[in-house]
Amino acid sequence: MSSQSVAAAGHTGPPKYSPQELERERRATLASPRRSYGVAARALFATMDLLYGRTRSLAKFKVLEIVARVPYQAWEQVAYIALTHRYSRTHLARRIFDRVVESRAQQDNEQWHLLILHELIDERNLRDSLVRHRLIPQLLAFVYYQLSVALYIVRPAWSYRLNADFEDHAEHEYALFVEENAWLAVVAYDGQFAEEYGRYASLGELFTQISLDERHHKNESLDKMAQPRFT
């Protein structure tokens, strides 16, 4: 099904792409410049490179996805707090709740990425240490959560910009991972999460879809930067 016909109606998540569209859009990502990342985003990426190396790997992407869900959790929580105080203003409460549903859908999409990556790592019996791949990512996620909340409270656009930087980074990293690893093109994905996320003729197509999910989230954050806190 063409991505053009799969509009992001409501909060159903990013569009799915045909194999031809996946390859075309991956090339578009590789040809596009990265965003001019802010200080906080650059510090986060530098920390991840220091802890996990510059080489793109399944294990490093798993860490990335543990952190990626955090802004959406933060926005959902802030929206729920706002809803508690403003539920009597019916129209505003409805708009706030729409933001809750949207944040939850974005968070769920990132959760599928994490589950799929863990599945692939487990299938290959790759080393997954307690400290480097479980405890430290949780610490990074905690710090990122607090920063996302603080920025959102002060000025929502700052929090959205940080997330746009993060998602832009993820979009390019996944696209480069496919470019660098020819073996991804000959291994199909039909794992335990295929029913919900999708079946793909190759892991290359799977990771390209994930890359484009991140692009979709980036564009959603960029759209929100110019909007009031709840619209």
Image (spheres, helix red, strand yellow):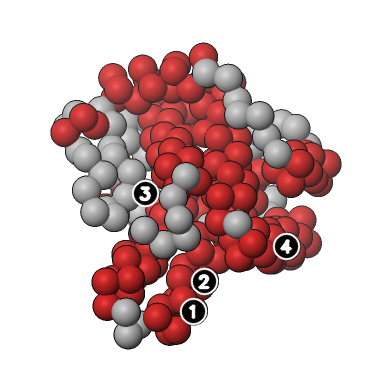
Tag 2, which secondary structure?
A: helix
Amino acid found under the numbered disc labelled 1? Ile
Residue 44: x, y in percent? 74, 46
Mark 2 and mark 4 in contact (Cβ < 8 Å)? no
Q: Nearer the viewer, residue 13 or 158?
A: 158
Q: Tell me if 52 is positioned left or right of 171 in this view.
A: right
Disc 3 versus disc 2: nearer the observer: 2
Mark 4 and mark 3 in contact (Cβ < 8 Å)? no
Mark carried by residue 78: 2
Q: CA distance from mark 3 to mark 1?
A: 37 Å
Q: Tell me if 76 is positioned left or right of 202 in this view.
A: right
Q: Residue at x 68, y 34 (%)?
A: 37
Mark carried by residue 119: none
Amino acid found under the numbered disc labelled 3? Gly
Q: Of label 1 and label 4, which has the lower sequence position?
A: 1
Q: CA distance from mark 2 to mark 1?
A: 5 Å
Q: Of label 3 and label 4, which has the lower sequence position?
A: 4
Q: Which residue is mark 4?
A: 143
Mark 1 and mark 2 in contact (Cβ < 8 Å)? yes
Mark carried by residue 81: 1
Amino acid found under the numbered disc labelled 2? Val
